[in-house]
Image (cartoon, rainbow, N blue to C red):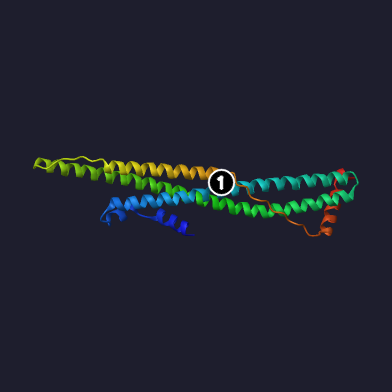
């Protein structure tokens, strides 16, 4: 829950208000970038797992729907052959598949909703991170320019001018850190694709009366006469 609250805080944060009310906007934005990187690094595997669960649930749903149709066809074939016992067994298996289909339908709907919500949140986080990085780059560039002007002005009155590269190096390290965090998150996302979810098994209760009624309905079809 803490991670998702942080996600909401980052998405809803107004960077303009934060920067204007802070004495050191560069330091604030650097901290914001670090927090966004951390949140995105934690969120990507969660999003990937939600996407994997949705795909697995959908696959199981389709498989059980196909099995229910197969057992229906087998029941019809048994009725046409005059084998009521075999037809009853096929109809029992069909009912089992239908119950699994109903449960998986609800599960897939919930998984799809969760996956879409998390993906939208991740996209919003990435957009906010890009905005913070742009603002940070602008502030750093302005600060460097101001430092250079101050040193040049000092040289004109007898001071020494020393153009350092520490600010550049810090920003380059920050850029590499962002790239590394995203790459690591992508790698974790790919690994999450390999995870498997165990299926559900449902034991069907006795439904002899319903089976008999469905059997009689099959036998009343033209092909069963």
**Which of the two residues, 86 or 195, is positioned nearer the viewer here?**
195
Could you tell whether 83 is left or right of 6 in the image? Answer: right
| Element marked by disc 1 | helix
Neighbours of disc 1 within 10 Å: few (<14), some (14-19), many (20+):
some
Residue 38, x across and y down, in percent = 43, 51
Q: Along the horizontal axis of the image, is 128 left or right of 223?
A: left
Instruction: Identify the image quadrant of residue 151.
Output: top left
Residue 10 visible: yes
Write the residue at 16% across / 40% down.
161
Residue 5 drawn at (x, y percent): 45, 58
Q: Nearer the viewer, residue 165 or 2?
A: 165
Tally of numbered discs: 1
Which residue is rendered at x = 84% and y = 49% of the image? 218
Viewer can see residue 222: no
Q: Quadrant of residue 149?
A: top left
Q: Which residue lies under the disc numbered 1?
A: 192
Residue 159, horizontal then vertical, whole percent: 11, 43
Going by the image, does 182 lie left or right of 106? left
| Quadrant holding the C terminus | top right
Residue plotted at (36% across, 46% down): 131
Q: Position of residue 224 (x, y in %)?
A: 88, 45
Residue at the (39%, 52%) spot, across then down: 35
Q: Nearer the viewer, residue 203 or 217?
A: 203
């Amino acid at each position: 829950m803490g991670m998702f609250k942080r996600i909401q805080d980052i998405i809803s944060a107004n960077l303009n208000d934060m920067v204007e009310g802070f004495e050191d906007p560069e330091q604030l934005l650097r901290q914001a970038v670090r927090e966004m990187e951390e949140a995105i690094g934690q969120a990507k595997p969660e999003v990937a797992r939600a996407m994997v669960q949705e795909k697995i649930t959908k696959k199981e749903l389709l498989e059980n729907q196909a099995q229910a149709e197969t057992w229906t066809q087998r029941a019809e074939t048994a009725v046409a052959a005059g084998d009521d016992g075999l037809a009853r067994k096929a109809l029992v298996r069909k009912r089992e598949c239908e119950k699994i289909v109903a449960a998986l339908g609800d599960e897939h709907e919930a998984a799809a909703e969760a996956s879409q919500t998390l993906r939208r949140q991740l996209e919003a986080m990435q957009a906010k991170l890009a905005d913070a990085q742009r603002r940070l780059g602008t502030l750093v560039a302005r600060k460097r320019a101001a430092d250079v002007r101050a040193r040049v002005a000092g040289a004109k009155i007898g001071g020494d001018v020393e153009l350092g590269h520490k600010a550049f190096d810090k920003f380059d390290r920050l850029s590499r850190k962002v790239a590394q965090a995203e790459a690591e998150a992508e790698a974790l996302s790919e690994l999450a694709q390999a995870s498997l979810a165990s299926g559900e098994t449902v034991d069907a209760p006795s439904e002899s009366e319903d089976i008999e009624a469905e059997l009689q309905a099959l036998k009343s079809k033209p092909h069963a006469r």
